[in-house]
Amino acid sequence: MSALKFLALLVVAVTVHSLGVRLWGDFAVFFDVFLVLTIAWAFEATTLTGLAAGLAAGLAADAFSGGIYGLNGFANTLVGYLTAFSVANLSKMSTSGAAIVCALAAVTQQLVLTLLVFVMVAEPTAPALVPMIWKIFITAAAGAVLFSARKRLIELTGSRRRAREARLRF
């Protein structure tokens, strides 16, 4: 069930990415839907599941990037693992804490991608700094919004479940 849920979210991410690039050509430069999916999945997953989600989302991002295949796969795998590991070791996280974790995950991804390009490409060029900073802020904001929405949804379903259980007493 969990794998099907992730695959459905991956299809949604591919759709959002495709529509965003079609409507605005620089969409992928400023917003990485696959990174947000990796981070959001790692928030509620084990380290192994976060690692697998990062790999799948990263390879999907590589399919659309037009660059070297595997760069985003490696970077998102690392981000998925580190995010799941850090969230598992934090007892309670607020929305601002989630935004910080998302920003750090985006910084990690950008650093890994930059290092891999400098290692693998014969004549590498430095990435543009302004879009990279925007991508980090947008990822942090999107992650915080998703974390807050997930937290609110859990609260709503929990209160409904408790109300239903209160009525079913025998």
Image (cartoon, rainbow, N blue to C red):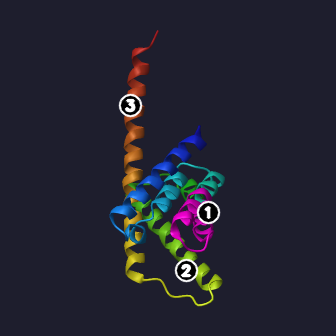
Circle 1: residue type: Thr
- Residue placed at 57% from the left, 68% from the top? 72
Does residue 65 show up magenta in the picture? Answer: yes
CA neighbours of label 1 inside 10 A, class few (<14), some (14 to 19), many (20+):
many
Residue 12 located left or right of residue 145: right
The answer to whether residue 108 is above or below residue 92 is below
Q: Compared with residue 31, is residue 40 higher up or lower down, i.e. above or below?
A: above
The residue wearing badge 2 is 114
Q: Earlier in the sequence, mark 2 or mark 1?
A: 1
Label 2 vs label 3: CA separation?
A: 46 Å
Residue drawn at 58 percent across, 75 percent down: 112
Q: Residues within 10 Å of mark 3 (few under 14, many from 20)?
A: few
Type of the residue with mark 2: Thr
Image height of 138 relative to 144, above or below: below
Work out whether mark 3 precedes mark 1 in sequence or the reverse, and give the earlier one.
1
What residue is drawn where x is 52% and y is 69%?
Answer: 65
Residue 117, quarter of picture: bottom right
Work out whether residue 99 can be spotted: yes
Residue 73, given in percent of the width and then of the height, sits at 61, 65
**Residue 139 magenta-drawn?**
no
- Give the mark toward the camera: 3 or 1: 1
Q: Which residues make up the magenta segment? A: 55-81
| In front of the other: 114 or 14 | 14
Q: Main secondary structure of the magenta part?
A: helix
Mark 2 residue crowding within 10 angstroms, few (<14) / some (14–19) / many (20+): some
Which mark is drawn over residue 77?
1
- Disc 3 marks which residue? 159
Q: Quadrant of the N terminus?
A: top right
| Residue, far left | 23
- Of the residues under marks 2 and 3, which one precedes in the sequence? 2
Above or below residue 39? Residue 116 is below
